[in-house]
Amino acid sequence: MIYRELGNTGIKVSEIGVGCEGFVDKSEEQVKEFIDLMEKEGVNCIDLYSPNPQMRSALGKALKGRRDKFVLQAHLCTIWKDGQYKRTRDIDEVKEGFEDQLKRLGTDHLEIGMIHYVDSVEEWSRVADGPVMQYALELKEKGVIQGIGLSSHNPQAALAAIRGGNVNVLMFSVNPCYDMMPASEDVEELWNEKNYENPLLNMDPDRQELYEECQRLGVGITVMKAFGGGDLLDSGLSPAGRALSSLQCLNYALTRPAVASVMSGVRTIEELKRDIAYENAPDEEKDYAPALAEFPKISWSGHCMYCGHCAPCPKGIDVAAVTKFLNLVVAQREIPETVREHYRTLPHKASECVSCGACEKRCPFQVKIIENMRKSAEIFGQ
């Protein structure tokens, strides 16, 4: 299992994580089977958006004696009321729900305290200036949580949050179809078939800016909906008109800037094994580029997807890495110190490009790589 730094939190997470869907409505024995397999294979990150009390208690028992081997991304503002999940901003309900979570999980701390489901800039402003954020900051100061997170489907709301300075982790919906959708306060728009009836061209600029801003600010991204609720794995349901494999979806998410871990919403042991197999799968099985280039309803022409098809460069330049650093600079209209230093560590710089064009011939997305290398050499001075 490969582990990644979760932004600047100091926490290392497995790049394959698990959402809590697979634990809901399962017996204690079944939940333990999940945790046994996760421990064996090194999957250490678990997202816990559901406030289901039975799930929390079963998971707490399964974690007993090995709690320190797992990173728990547990949500504030989700409570169990009248036998069902409810999102709340009522601070008394938030506190009661969080205390219940600690008790049922059998722990006195959680690595990430995730402020749950903020999909509008207005709502973020209310949260940021209200008692929920104050409570999260108090929990962090006391060491009850190590980092403050936010879950969102709206890149504009997420951008406002990460720029506020208190959010350390962003849980965001990342997949090659949702990345084409403009910002909306209605999450239903992400999977509304009508929005995919006409051809879509290139990534939504707000989403690209969000990923690059997270990279610049050191905000780690944990991914939800990498499979689009399973729709992307089914050609009859995929908004793109063609299916991707789970390995391709995982690889797409994990190659976005700032992404640390994908929370796979697996519901069976077999699905968990399928996603863990990503770690040892051959590159050709994980390669999403040919599939994306042939989607009948979506086009990324001219947009670098960091897929690596440009390699190998005869001069040894890591073209995808150079392009990613270039895009970060262009997005910020300045050269962040961290980006400059990361560029300097590259063994071969953009200035070594001889414009042979081999990379452009291999690129499935018709990116003007030679021009990008020229710009990078000018910007970084080497």
Image: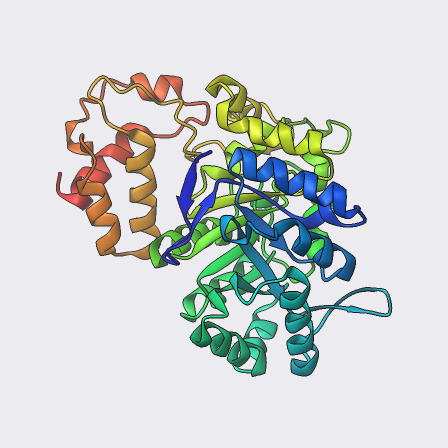
Name the residue furthest right: 82
Q: Residue drawn 63% across and 28% down?
A: 274
Q: Please give the name of the residue rendered at 28% of the width and 19% of the height, measured from the top-left corner.
A: 357
Q: Nearer the viewer, residue 209 or 52?
A: 52
Of residues 86 and 293, the one nearer the viewer is: 86
Q: x and y percent of residue 368 in the render? A: 34, 30
Q: Residue furthest front?
A: 65
Q: How is the image coloured?
A: rainbow
> Is residue 197 shown to the viewer in this render?
no
Q: Residue 362 sits in which quadrant? A: top left
Q: Is residue 56 left or right of residue 127?
A: right
Above or below — where is 46 with respect to 320? below
Residue 382: image location, x then y, percent:
13, 38
Q: Determine the residue positioned at 71% across, 37% down.
A: 230
Quadrant hosting residue 186:
bottom right
Q: Position of residue 32 (x, y in %)?
A: 69, 43
Residue 166 is situated, as x and y percent measured from the top left of the image, at 43, 70
Left/right placement of residue 165 relative to residue 190 reads left
Looking at the image, residue 208 lies above or below residue 83: above
Tally the numbered discs.
0
Whether 79 is drawn above or below 296: the answer is below
Q: Residue at x 50, y 28 (%)?
A: 279
Q: Nearer the viewer, residue 350 or 41?
A: 41
